[in-house]
Image: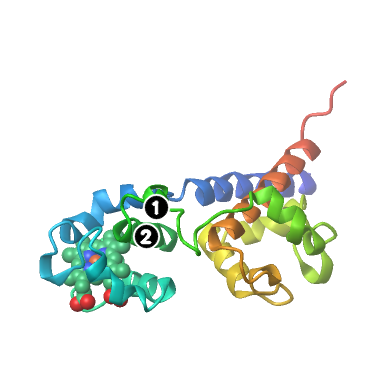
Amino acid sequence: MKKTFYLLALGSVFAITTQGAFAANDRTGGEVVKAVCGKCHETGEGGAPKIGDLAAWGPRMTQGMNTLTTHAVQGYRGMPAHGGEISITDLELTRAIIYMIAPKGAGHAGVNTAILDTKYSGKDLYDKRCQEGHAAGKEGAPKTGDASAWGPRLAKGMDALTESAVRGHNAMPARGGLATISDAEIRLAIDYMISKTSESFAKQHAKPKH
Ligand code: HEC
């Protein structure tokens, strides 16, 4: 009985958190700009650098994407924190910035810089690098397919998981030890591991066929 309850509880944690993680306002840069940032960045109100105006963005870009994103997250002089809409995630802010810098680029979908560029699919990157630690659950790494190891981590949300993988966390090296992979690729690889885990969780708990 106790065990059934535990599995049910874990199942619902999974349902809630995976839904939360994936459904979390994953809008494209273009969508976020249209909904929020355009209000000032379309017209240049209050000195906001205008969309696609490289002369205005150029000097700001030299600070690097991380600083630009931090400024958008925390607010910066006339720029309100999160563009005034607190529900926008950091990833969406990054995409919106890329879109504003190069609205005609592939940044439309939020994927055209060194930070967001994806050369590897989630599976490719997993096979190339992540499985070394995660296939066997080495040094405390949550094992691929192990729902009880991933469950509590999922509760942190995809943004936080991506950030720990980018920065490094305990025995997990920053960017899995591959300096050249982008945040977006890391996120895809995490998505991949979670999807494998959800699959094996579902298989383990599928009703036995008689
Ligand atoms: C209420 C108006 C307003 C809205 C809405 C707004 N911004 Fe801004 N933003 C500004 C202004 C004004 C500046 C220039 C601040 C300065 O440098 O004095 C700015 C500057 C910036 C900068 C450059 C910061 C730097 O370090 O130079 C970024 C990045 C940015 N905005 C991103 C965004 C994003 C992303 C959104 C939408 C989620 C957004 N902004 C929405 C007014 C706005």
- Mark 2 residue element: helix
Q: Position of residue 155 (x, y in %)?
A: 58, 58
Q: Nearer the viewer, residue 53 or 9?
A: 53
- Mark 1 residue element: helix
Residue 186, by quadrant, is bottom right
Residue identified by numbered label 1: 107
Q: Position of residue 171 (x, y in %)?
A: 74, 76
Q: Nearer the viewer, residue 176 or 115?
A: 115
Cβ–Cβ under 8 Å for marks 2 and 1 = yes
Name the colouring of the figure: rainbow
Name of the residue lying farthest toward the right: 210
Picture mark count: 2
Quadrant position of the N terminus in the picture: top right
Quadrant position of the C terminus in the picture: top right
Q: Amino acid at mark 2?
A: Ile
- Mark 2: few/some/many CA within 10 Å (<14, 14-19, 20+): many
Name of the residue lying farthest toward the front: 55
Name of the residue lying farthest toward the top: 210
Residue 182 lies left or right of residue 49; in this view the side is right
Residue 163 lies left or right of residue 41; in this view the side is right
| Separation of marks 2 and 1 at Cα, in angstroms | 6 Å
Label 2 vs 1, first from the N-terminus: 2
What residue is rendered at 25% in x and 49% in y?
Answer: 34
Residue identified by numbered label 2: 98
Q: Position of residue 98 (x, y in %)?
A: 37, 60
What residue is rendered at 74% in x and 43% in y?
Answer: 201
Q: Amino acid at mark 1?
A: Gly
